[in-house]
Structure formats: structure tokens, C-alpha cells
Amino acid sequence: MTPSEMLSHIDHTQLKAFCTWEDIKKLCEEAISYQTASVCIPPCYIKRVHDTFGDNINICTVVGFPLGYSVTAAKIAETQQALEDGANEIDMVINITDVKNGNMAAVQEEIATLKRVTGDKILKVIIETCYLTEYEKIALCKAVTDAGADYIKTSTGFGTGGATVEDIKLFREHIGSQVKMKAAGGVRSVEDLEAFLDLGCERIGTSSAVNMLK
């Protein structure tokens, strides 16, 4: 796979709490220049990016980020505002406390609720694999599939670990045919990019792909 082909699968990401407008503007200019799949940015910057770059850029943002335990009503409000401001893709964090309490029905219903809000826009579901058992990961593959989400995503990048080859292989075995995969967190080398793309990931979330592949 050529560098340009790899970049077409990248969600070019800047989600640090202290990122400035100059950081975001540089990210967007790189995304346009290198034709990444999207930019993944904090919700507070969506409108400014949309007003500045218009349809030249595909905007992805995060909801319930990074811990996931905000109430569903708050996630709905975040999602609605993000779409109104110009986002096309939403990366939501599940409520991991529901998973640990064995309430998978609540997790699935929250995902389905946000998919109803996003409609024909893309919904990616971050399950934060570093906190989960294998049984929980498999159960979440089913929940994400049954809820009608577009993607399952490994990580926020703010947990205790990121994407692993083993988790992507597990996803591939247990997700439905309509669900795509996104690896994120700790993807820092060309070899990492190639490994995850070879395993079938449609998207990779990273802040360093452009520098790696220039």
C-alpha cells in the first residue's frame, strides 16, 4: 500500500486538552494537503473549522470523551450540537461502568440512540479495550453490531493502553459484516499502520501518520 493510500484511511487527530487554534489549523491544512480521511478534533473547534475550511475537509469529533460515563442525554446533546456545527462523523465513548455492571442492554440502547441521532452520518463506537476482558470485548462486538453503528473503535488514546493486533483480530471474528473497524491509540510507526490496515481496519486514528508518511 502506498503512503497516499494509507493516508486515505487516517483520521488525522488532535484531541489534547490544551490544543490551540494554530494546532487545529495546522492539522486541517495537513489533512487537506495529504488527503486524509478526516480530521478528528475537539467539539469546541468544529464550527470554526467548518467556517474556515468548508467542504474541503471531513470533520470527525468525539462525544462522551474520554471517560464515557456522562449520561445519555448529555451525549445526545453533544452529538446534536456537533452535527449542527458541521461534523460528519461522531466517535462516541461507551459507558464502561455499564459494561462492568453487566448491563450490556443499556450500552446497546445508548449506541442505538446515538445512531438514531446521527442518521446517515457515521457513528464510531469507542469501547476502550484496555479496561475490558475478552468476554466483554466479544459482548461489545455484538452490542455495536446489533445497535446499528458504523464502526467499532479500540481506544480513546487517553486510557492505559491503545490498539493491539490481538484486539483487531478479535473484532474481526465477532463483529457483523456491516461494521467497520478503527484502530486508535499508540499507532506510532509505519509498521503499525501497515499491520492494522492489513488486518482490515478501514480507519486509523493517530496524530503522527502525516509526519511518518511525508
Image (cartoon, grey):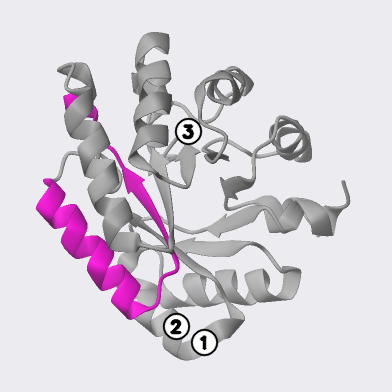
**Circle 1 residue:** 54
* Mark 1: few/some/many CA within 10 Å (<14, 14-19, 20+): few
- Residue 107 relative to residue 32: left or right: left
Give the CA distance from mark 3 to mark 2: 27 Å
Please state the horizontal and vertical placement of residue 177, each as a whole percent of the image: 57, 34
Query: Disc 3 residue type?
Result: Thr
Please state the horizontal and vertical placement of residue 69, each as a whole percent of the image: 17, 39
In the figure, 85 relative to 124: above or below? below
Please state the horizontal and vertical placement of residue 163, each as a whole percent of the image: 54, 30
In the figure, 115 relative to 36: above or below? above
Q: Quadrant of residue 89?
A: bottom left
**Circle 3 residue:** 154
Query: Which residue range is magenta in the image?
Result: 71-98
Query: Disc 1 residue type?
Result: Gly
Give the CA distance from mark 2 to mark 1: 5 Å
Residue visible at 58% across and 53% down? 207
Q: In which quarter of the image is residue 93?
A: top left
**Circle 2 residue:** 50
Mark 3–mark 1 CB contact (< 8 Å): no
Please state the horizontal and vertical placement of residue 50, each as a whole percent of the image: 44, 83
Magenta span dominant secondary structure: helix
Give the CA distance from mark 3 to mark 1: 29 Å
- Residue 74 relative to residue 111: left or right: left
Looking at the rendered structure, the secondary structure element under dot 1 is helix
Query: Foreground residue, 161 or 113?
Result: 113
